[in-house]
Structure formats: C-alpha cells, structure tokens
C-alpha cells in the first residue's frame, strides 16, 4: 500500500446525476477502482452531520450534530484527522464551505485552505489548484479535498437540473486532474455526502440518502461493484490504507 490517501468529497452528488453528466471519465473511474452507486448517507442527510459522521465513523445520534451548526460532542470521539495526527501523519484540508472546518479539531491539520464558495463560480477548480500545488510542494500524508459547487447548484437551480449536472461534470474534471498527477503516490477515495431533490435535501428519501463511492488504489479491484457501504466506512478505510489503527469508538469498518 502507498500509505498516503487523497479523499475527495463532492457535496450533494446524486449517483444518477453522476451517471447523467456525460463525462467520459466516470467510466474510467469504474474501471480503475471498486465502486458503488448505492452507498448510504446518514440521517439527517445534511452536509455537516454527514461529514462529521464520515470523518468520525459514528452516526449523528452519537456525535450529536444534527444541523449545519456545530455543537460540541457530549461524549467526544476522535476523528480521522486527530487519529492521523496522533500517529505522526500530516493532513491537508481544502474546502469551500466554512462550517466544515469543525470536522478537524485544532492542531490536527498541517495545512488548510478555505475559499469562500459564494464569491467565485469556479471555487472547485480553485480549490483543486490549491490542493495540487500543496501536494507537489509538501506531499502530505492525507489530503481532504471538498468540492461544493454541486450542492450550491442544486439549491439554486434544483437537483438534476442542467446547471447541477454541469457542476458534477466539472467536479469530475477536477477529480481527473488529481488522479492523473498523484495516483502513483496516493490511493484515492471519491465520495458524496448526500443527494438532493427539488432544491433541498435532508430527508430520508432515496434521492437524498443514496450516494456513490469510488475506491481507487492497490487494495481495490478495478471494475468491482460494491454493496452495503456507508459514510461510516470512510475513516476506517483511510486509517487502514495509511497503516494506522482506527479509533476504538468508531462504528464503521475498513472495506478491505
């Protein structure tokens, strides 16, 4: 294993939206790695609870964050950034929605870049530029690149609208840029936190709860479709790829 991981989260990306975007790189992702179009989000299917569950491998009922407003955990659980920092690993975080900063505790990051997603239409590309530059300069052990334009397009124009589908294709273009440059050094995981319907999300409907995952790297068989995965598998899988013990409080398991 390469013991370095890049995790890319495409906010609000529905599996059927990904398949409908027409980007030819989607079929390449299927060939390169193991994947599912039937992964599960968490309830409520809202961005901060979803990413907190992803990074801490516990459901919202355990971490207590049920909206996009952070509240301290009653019974704290270490997240992936803290676990990696405790093992001497360096992490970098690139994000376009400020509230997401709370998934990483103080002193758990070596690098962080935030770009306000409400002031630039191409923030996903700018964040990808920043991530590529930092990886080339510093080669951090774990990189989390969060792309947000898809979610904004869903809220503004509607999920499955032409504008939303176009943002998915742009996100996949940025995924390709990262993989083309760094797959020889990093295993890569691509995920979505939730889907959406009309101009919203957060319900238990399949449109909101069903998400895609791609796992690309040496441990993962190319072209293999996976089943039964959820956001809770992400942190344990990252830890195992990096040869770091998972936190004993985590509920999810590595997928290999």
Image (cartoon, rainbow, N blue to C red):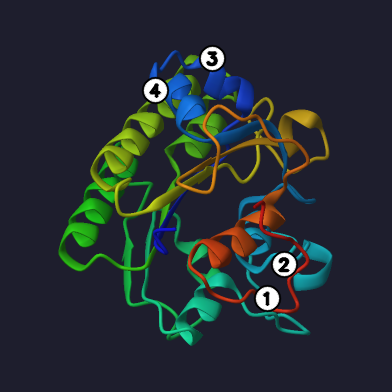
- In this figure, which residue is indicated by the disc labeled 1? 71
Of badges 2 and 4, the one in the foreground is 4
The x and y percentages for residue 123 are: 31, 44
Q: From mark 4 to mark 1, how far is it between C-alphas?
A: 39 Å
* Residue 20: mark in rendering: 3
Residue 122 placement, left or right of 78: left
The x and y percentages for residue 174 are: 32, 36
Label whose residue precedes the other's in the sequence (3 or 4)? 3
Asked if labels 1 and 4 touch by Cβ distance under 8 angstroms, the answer is no
Give SS at disc 3: helix
Give SS at disc 2: loop
- In this figure, which residue is indicated by the disc labeled 2? 65
Residue at 33% in and 30% down = 173
Q: From mark 3 to mark 1, how far is it between C-alphas?
A: 37 Å
Label whose residue precedes the other's in the sequence (3 or 2)? 3
* Residue 25: mark in rendering: 4
Of badges 4 and 1, the one in the foreground is 4
* On screen, residue 202 above or below 141: above
Q: From mark 1 to mark 2, how far is it between C-alphas?
A: 6 Å
Give SS at disc 4: helix
Label whose residue precedes the other's in the sequence (4 or 1)? 4
Residue at 55% in and 30% down = 154
Label whose residue precedes the other's in the sequence (2 or 4)? 4
Asked if labels 2 and 3 touch by Cβ distance under 8 angstroms, the answer is no
Few, some or many C-alpha atoms within 10 Å of disc 3 (few <14, some 14-19, many ≥20)? some
Label whose residue precedes the other's in the sequence (1 or 2)? 2
Residue at 56% in and 71% down = 80
Asked if labels 1 and 3 touch by Cβ distance under 8 angstroms, the answer is no
Pick the residue in front: 90 or 103.
90
Asked if labels 2 and 1 touch by Cβ distance under 8 angstroms, the answer is yes
* Residue 156: mark in rendering: none
């Amino acid at each position: 294993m390469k013991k370095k991981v890049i995790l890319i989260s495409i906010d609000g990306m529905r599996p059927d939206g990904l398949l409908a975007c027409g980007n030819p790189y989607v079929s390449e992702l299927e060939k390169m790695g193991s994947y599912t179009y039937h992964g599960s989000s968490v309830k409520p299917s809202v961005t901060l609870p979803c990413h907190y569950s992803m990074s801490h491998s516990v459901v919202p009922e355990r971490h207590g964050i049920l909206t996009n407003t952070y509240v301290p955990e009653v019974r704290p659980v270490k997240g992936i950034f803290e676990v990696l920092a405790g093992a001497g690993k360096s992490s970098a975080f690139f994000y376009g929605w400020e509230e997401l900063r709370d998934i990483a505790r103080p002193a758990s990051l070596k690098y962080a870049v935030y770009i306000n997603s409400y002031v630039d239409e191409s923030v996903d590309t700018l964040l990808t530029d920043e991530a590529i530059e930092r990886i080339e300069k510093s080669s951090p052990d774990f990189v989390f690149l969060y792309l947000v334009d898809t979610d904004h397009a869903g809220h503004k124009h509607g999920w499955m609208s032409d504008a939303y589908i176009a943002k998915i294709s742009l996100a996949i273009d940025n995924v390709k840029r990262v993989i083309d440059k760094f797959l020889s050094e990093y295993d890569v995981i691509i995920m979505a936190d939730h889907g959406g319907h009309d101009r919203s999300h957060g319900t238990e409907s399949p449109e909101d709860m069903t998400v895609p995952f791609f796992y690309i790297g040496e441990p993962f068989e190319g072209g293999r479709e996976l089943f039964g995965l959820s956001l809770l598998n992400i942190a344990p899988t990252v830890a195992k790829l990096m040869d770091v013990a998972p936190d004993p409080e985590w509920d999810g398991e590595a997928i290999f």
